[in-house]
Amino acid sequence: MNYLGSKKVETERLVLKAQTMAEQKRLWEILMIPEVNKCFLTVPPKFKEKLLDWNKQEEYYKMDMEHANDADIFRWSIFLKRNW
């Protein structure tokens, strides 16, 4: 089996593509909305303070994305084509 990694994949309705830092920041901004945060940001309390600071999160995302285009990594941003 040949791995594609996070290469761009399109279906009739979706576009899956490798994540970008801009998308990661926007996702982080959404997760910081209190109404969203209480339901979707389920982390131990000791880590929650670190999540509130984008500069700390940005470092984490940069390290995480260093290998985002490797053939054995599968992390996509997913868009509906009508919004693409």
Image (spheres, grey):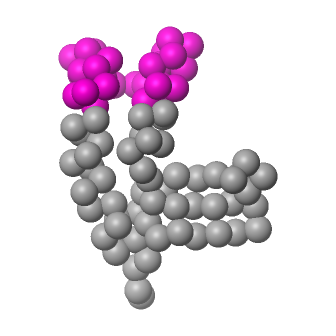
The quarter of the rendered structure image containing the N terminus is: bottom left
Compared with 28, 80 (above or below) is below
Q: Position of residue 76 (x, y in %)?
A: 48, 56
Residue in view at x 64 percent, y 52 percent: 79
Q: Is residue 24 visible?
A: yes
Q: Is residue 27 left or right of residue 12?
A: left
SS assignment for the magenta stretch, majority: helix
Q: How many marks?
A: 0
Q: Position of residue 4 (x, y in %)?
A: 43, 77
Q: Residue furthest bottom?
A: 1
Q: Is residue 49 left or right of residue 42?
A: left
Compared with 74, 80 (above or below) is above
Q: Residue furthest top?
A: 34
Compared with 52, 58 (above or below) is below
Compared with 66, 29 (above or below) is above
Residue in view at x 58 percent, y 53 percent: 78
Q: Is residue 73 left or right of residue 18?
A: left
Magenta segment: 28-57
Q: Is residue 38 magenta?
A: yes
Q: Is residue 39 visible?
A: no
Residue in view at x 33 percent, y 60 percent: 68
Q: Is residue 41 magenta?
A: yes
Q: Position of residue 62 (x, y in %)?
A: 26, 46
Which quarter of the figure has residue 44? top left
Q: Position of residue 2 (x, y in %)?
A: 41, 86
Residue in view at x 29 percent, y 42 percent: 61
